[in-house]
Amino acid sequence: MVDVDTLDELSVALLATVARTCFDTLRARKSRRDKQLGPRLPDPLVARHEEGDPTRHVPQTDTISLALLVVLETLTPAERVVFVLHDMFAVPFEQIAAIVERAPPAVRQLEQRARRRVSSVARALREPAQEGHHARLAVEAFLAAAKSSDFDALLAVLDPDVLLRTDRGAVPLGGASELRGAGLVAKQTLSFAKLTERAQRVFVNAGPGLITWLPGGHPFAVLGFSVIRDKIVELYVFADPSRLARLDLTALSPVPR
């Protein structure tokens, strides 16, 4: 028979080793990222939009939205490791302290700061309007307005304080650029729309999204949305060609007519 206590000890040791490796990786990545412009957008999960069953792909409560992923990216390496270990795996602060090289009281403060940031986004995304039907209607209105170059219609579907984050390989040193405010985001949206031939509805991290395509069938960008109370509050644009290539969007390309 296998000793249960031995298995528990091995599990704790393995978790500590993995956590330490992740902590070191996050610190190294942060050092490299500090040389870039702005925060990095996390890689999205993109899936085909299926017609016929409007509830099939409604975002589930265990799906990590882009908004939450972006918040996690803003945490320091220590905050992120402490939050994941304590809030998701219930690891005691005393054990985490050795991993992040902090005293237990300092670890507790890190967890509290991280939880406050994540909780604010989680509460907003639990609003009823974030459910699939309302979010899809908002994105469809956004798409229709962009196709028709209707500036006023874009303003109507965007929250006045909407935030646009764009991860573009074209900006110096790469990274994500940010733009805030309905007027500025609407203007930027219309400039993007002029460069694309068509847009295709998809799911991005189980929420509503779009793929825009260049003439010739090459992807131009992946767009992900956060919608609250029928308004788009955050818009994520992934337009770095190298990252789009890694997503392998060719399998999602609509069949040519």
Image (cartoon, rainbow, N blue to C red):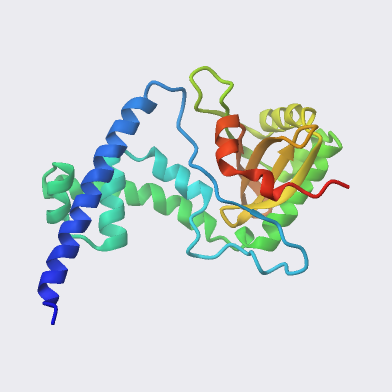
* Quarter location, residue 85: bottom left
Q: Do we see residue 127 in this rendering?
A: yes
Q: Is residue 225 above or below residue 176?
A: below
Q: Is residue 95 left or right of residue 183?
A: left
Image position, residue 57 (x, y; %): 64, 64
Q: Quadrant of the N terminus?
A: bottom left
Residue drawn at point x = 47 percent, y = 42 percent: 70
Q: Is residue 108 left or right of residue 71?
A: left
Residue in front for this viewpoint, 1 or 54:
1
Residue drawn at point x = 31 percent, y = 38 percent: 26
Image position, residue 76 (x, y; %): 31, 38
Q: Is residue 201 above or below residue 221?
A: below
Residue extending furthest front? 1
Residue drawn at point x = 55 percent, y = 35 percent: 243
Q: Do we see residue 240 in this rendering?
A: no
Residue drawn at point x = 56 percent, y = 53 percent: 205
Image position, residue 137 (x, y; %): 75, 55
Residue extending furthest bottom? 1
Image position, residue 34 (x, y; %): 37, 24
Q: Is residue 109 above or below residue 60?
A: above
* Quarter location, residue 131: bottom right
Residue in front for this viewpoint, 190 or 108:
190
